[in-house]
Image: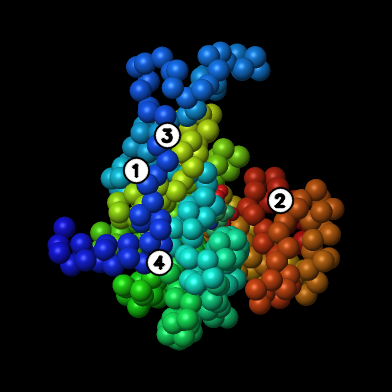
């Protein structure tokens, strides 16, 4: 590692809360599976409700080594560059808490985008500075730069970028993300949330981590891998940032069953099924988009690199009612973050998509 990049890691760590940098992490019960456990005040017997022999009466392994290895392998990083948590929501929370001092620091968001970045900041008592996306849902670089300039009173510590973006569906232009990464070097960390990366053909920003220690990438098993109900996500970044987050994640964050199913999801057979399903959903997304382009109910269907479509209509309520009439609930974004009569439709099974097409034809 060059001295320049060592300096940059120090620079990004210096942006984190001093009290968290100095924090001595909670000392959890040692993980010594070869010994019988009388060190964690657990019950020695399984609960009656569990008959399959899985040790649910034991606390799970903190940052389970096998799962961390498997996910690191899947994302192409070293095991110490990844923190596994309860969905990327947990990563958003941990990053916000590690970097933002209450009532002193701020985060930057580019709405319309995923709402948890601003919610996590508000819970932490941090400010939220908005640099709204342009009408084509791409980054407004001048607005981002001027917001960064004007932030001396409450320094922006985290810049949240989501690509493909929720709820708009588009990927942010690579040159724009690169410009933001360069603009904030030494002043803030950039987090690129890639929750929907598997549905897009863009290369992951994980590839840019080696030259950008202040870049962090969020991934999740909730979307393409179908594990939303089990809650598994990953923060991927420089090992020094990951070490910092490991200090503040609750010691037994990942439940035993979650780890077990996530391990299976990382096996070759499951990954092959995931690729097939992603292929099917991507084809269905384009089928839906083309069929809905002639819908009398809709005025616009935005292109998408994710597993959903953002659509606009003259009368959003009527669209919601028609879809409810065929048993489907979609997400109402009317009037949110500058969106007009906008509705976000998740791409479903071919049968569900047929029902959408029929009800909006
Ligand atoms: C962009 C984005 N990031 C993160 C999340 C949270 O996902 P997870 O289930 O991994 O917490 C979502 C969920 O909808 C999302 O759309």
- For the residues labelled 3 and 1, the Cα–Cα distance comes to 23 Å
Query: Is there a contact, CB below 8 Å, between mark 3 and mark 2?
Result: no
Between discs 1 and 4, the one toward the N terminus: 1
Residue 31: image quadrant is top left
Q: Is residue 210 above or below residue 84?
A: below
Residue holding disc 4:
190
- Answer whether labels 1 and 4 touch (C-beta < 8 Å): no
- Disc 4 C-beta below 8 A from ligand 1: no
**SS for callout 3:** loop
| Residue of label 3 | 28
* Numbered disc in front, either 3 or 2: 3
At x 53%, y 14%, the residue is 44
Q: Give the Cα distance between marks 3 and 2.
A: 51 Å
Whichever of labels 3 and 1 marks the residue nearer the N terminus, that label is: 3
* Crowd class of label 3 (few under 14; some 14 to 19; many from 20; radius 10 Å): some
**C-alpha span from label 1 to label 2:** 38 Å
**Is label 2 within 8 A of ligand 1 (CB to nearest ligand atom)?**
no
* Residue 156 drawn above or below residue 276: below
Q: Position of residue 117 (x, y in %)?
A: 55, 63
Which residue, given by chain and number where applicable, does mark 2 sit on? 354
Residue 65, compared with residue 172, is above or below; it is: above
At 53% from the left and 29% from the top, the residue drawn is 257
Q: Which mark is residue 72?
A: 1
- Per the image, label 2 sits on a secondary structure element best described as helix
Earlier in the chain: of badge 1 and badge 2, it is: 1
- Whether label 1 lies within 8 Å of ligand 1 gets the answer no
Find the distance from the CA under tag 1 to the CA under tag 4: 20 Å
Foreground label between 3 and 4: 3
């Amino acid at each position: 590692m060059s001295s320049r990049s060592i300096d940059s890691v120090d620079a990004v760590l210096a942006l984190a809360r001093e009290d968290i940098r100095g924090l001595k992490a909670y000392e959890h019960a040692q993980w010594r599976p070869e010994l019988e456990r009388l060190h964690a005040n657990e019950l020695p017997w399984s609960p009656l409700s569990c008959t399959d022999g899985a040790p649910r009466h034991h606390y799970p392994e903190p940052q389970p080594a096998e799962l961390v290895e498997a996910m690191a392998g899947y994302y192409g990083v070293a095991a110490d560059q990844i923190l596994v948590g309860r969905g990327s929501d947990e990563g958003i929370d941990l990053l916000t808490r590690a970097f933002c001092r209450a009532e002193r620091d701020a985060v930057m968001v580019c709405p319309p985008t995923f709402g948890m970045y601003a919610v996590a900041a508000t819970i932490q008592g941090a400010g939220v500075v908005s640099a709204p996306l342009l009408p084509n849902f791409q980054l407004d670089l001048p607005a981002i730069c001027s917001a960064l300039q004007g932030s001396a009173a409450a320094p922006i510590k985290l810049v949240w970028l989501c690509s493909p973006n929720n709820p708009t569906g588009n990927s942010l232009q690579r040159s724009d993300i690169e410009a933001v990464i360069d603009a904030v070097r030494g002043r803030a960390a950039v987090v690129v949330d890639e929750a929907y990366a598997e549905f897009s053909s863009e290369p992951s920003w994980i590839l840019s981590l080696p030259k950008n220690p202040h870049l962090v990438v969020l991934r999740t098993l909730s979307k393409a891998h179908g594990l939303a109900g089990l809650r598994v996500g990953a923060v991927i970044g420089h090992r020094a940032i990951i070490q910092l987050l490991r200090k503040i994640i609750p010691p037994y964050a990942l439940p035993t069953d979650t780890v077990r199913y996530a391990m299976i999801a990382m096996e070759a057979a499951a990954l092959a099924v995931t690729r097939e399903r992603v292929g099917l959903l991507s084809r269905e997304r384009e089928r839906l988009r083309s069929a809905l382009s002639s819908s009398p109910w809709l005025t616009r269907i935005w292109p998408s690199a994710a597993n959903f479509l953002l659509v606009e209509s003259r009368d959003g309520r009527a669209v919601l009612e028609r879809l409810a009439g065929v048993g489907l609930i979609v997400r109402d974004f009317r009037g949110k973050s500058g969106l007009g009569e906008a509705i976000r439709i998740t791409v479903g099974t071919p049968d569900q998509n047929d029902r959408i097409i029929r009800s909006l034809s």
